[in-house]
Amino acid sequence: MTQRTAIHAFRLLVLMGCSAPALWLAWQWFYGDLGVVPGEAVVHFTGTTGLSLLLITIAFSPAFRFTGWVGFMAARRQIGLWAFFWLVAHMLAWMGLDQYWDWPWIRREMVELPYIRYGAAALLLLVPLALTSFRRAQQGMGRTAWHWLHRLVYVSALLGVVHLWILTRADYLLPSVFAAVLFALVVFRLIDAAIHRQ
């Protein structure tokens, strides 16, 4: 198998892996297997999926550093856009299935509840990253400015973890795992930057 074929196969696996949760969610919704409050289950599922993919997006750079395989970098934009898709779906599910598009109430929730503000801020930070994720944008901005902008992904991920942590009421295993993964990725980034600065 040539490297190009391997990269295409990997991108196909990313496509299948990132879209499969939507099929599972639709199946669960259709058969009524999302619990007593299906709308709330959809909100939590889309948020968890989006945050997971966001962390995987960040993890693709260390994976490339350790393995040297360019497939990780070739698929990083793809999986990053999927993370953005799922987090937008999370916000829309919250507005529609949880808040019933009650805009005055939505605005009140955003003002009064810190975890809503953290989540909204995390998503807003991803908007310029999604809009500039294409090669033409990178060429137009210049490589240095583009890289600095896309470091906002770490801030967005941190806000996402804080959002989940505050929202959690009992079992902190999942937010703890997310926090530990993000911490490890940030430490790797700092060490890698220090090494390449020398």
Image (cartoon, rainbow, N blue to C red):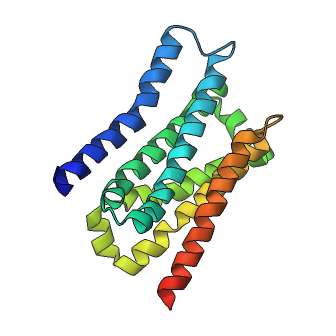
Q: Residue 92: x and y, percent?
A: 54, 34
For residue 37, which quarter of the picture? top right
Q: Is residue 153 left or right of residue 107?
A: left
Q: Which residue appears farthest toward the right when viewing the image?
A: 170
Task: Give the residue displayed 54% in from the left and 38% down from the top.
Answer: 49
Q: Which quarter of the picture shows residue 46?
A: top right
Residue 39 vertical position relative to residue 52 in the rendered view, above or below: above
- Please tell me whether residue 22 is drawn above or below residue 134 in the rendered image: above
Q: Is residue 88 above or below residue 141?
A: above
Q: Position of residue 106 (x, y in %)?
A: 68, 37
Q: Is residue 163 visible?
A: no
Q: Residue at x 78, y 41 (%)?
A: 172
Residue ranking furthest to the top: 31
Q: Nearer the viewer, residue 74 or 124?
A: 74
Q: In the drawing, does residue 16 fall left or right of residue 152?
A: left
Q: Is residue 54 visible?
A: yes
How many labels, in total?
0
The front one of 164 and 75 is 75
Residue 126 horizontal/vertical position (percent): 51, 56
